[in-house]
């Protein structure tokens, strides 16, 4: 008769856990292949020669579709001048809000340069 304590013991040791081939090899390999293919495509596309010239033949063919602007100076008080800067600009590959954001970012240095020029001219007088 078999010993009851040995009844619960398995006859052979437990089998090893299945190897996770997909996690360890297939997924990283697939990721590396995709990255290499994207880099290869980018290199080929970046070096691809265009069949047509990119230089516009006229200003109307270029990126600047509209470029109109003006400065309006108005006497505002004793020793004060109101400066109005009007600009209408359309650049073909970029939406208006992007162009506006870039221009507003550059407006402060332009106005500072105008103020410095006015002060320098006043000191000459």
Image: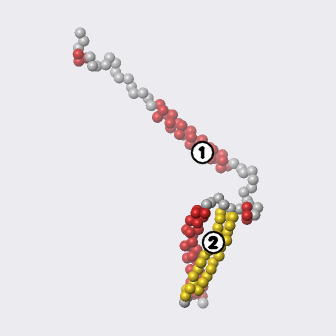
Above or below, 100 relative to 32: below
Above or below, 74 relative to 63: below
Give left or right: position of 27 versus 99: left
The label shown at residue 99 is none
Question: SS for tag 2?
Answer: strand
Instruction: Decide: few, some or many residues near mark 1? Use Cα within 10 Å; few <14, some 14-19, many ≥20.
Output: few
**Residue denoted by label 2:** 87
Q: How many marks?
A: 2
Residue 5: name its quadrant.
Answer: top left
The location of residue 111, given as percent across then percent down, is 57, 76
Residue 41 in sight: yes
Residue at the spot x=53%, y=39% of the render?
31
**Residue denoted by label 1:** 39
Q: Are marks 2 and 1 in contact (CB under 8 Å)?
A: no
N-terminal of the two: label 2 or label 1?
Answer: 1
Q: CA distance from mark 2 to mark 1?
A: 41 Å
């Amino acid at each position: 008769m078999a010993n009851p304590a040995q009844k619960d013991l398995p006859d052979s040791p437990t089998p090893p856990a299945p190897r996770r081939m997909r996690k360890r090899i297939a997924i990283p390999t697939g990721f590396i292949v995709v990255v290499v293919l994207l880099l290869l495509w980018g290199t080929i596309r970046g070096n691809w020669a265009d069949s047509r010239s990119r230089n516009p033949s006229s200003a109307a063919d270029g990126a600047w579709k509209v470029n109109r602007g003006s400065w309006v100076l108005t006497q505002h008080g004793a020793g004060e001048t109101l400066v109005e800067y009007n600009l209408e600009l359309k650049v073909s590959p970029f939406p208006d809000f992007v162009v506006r954001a870039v221009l507003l970012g550059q407006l402060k240095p332009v106005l500072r340069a105008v103020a410095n020029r006015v002060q320098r001219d006043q000191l000459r007088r």
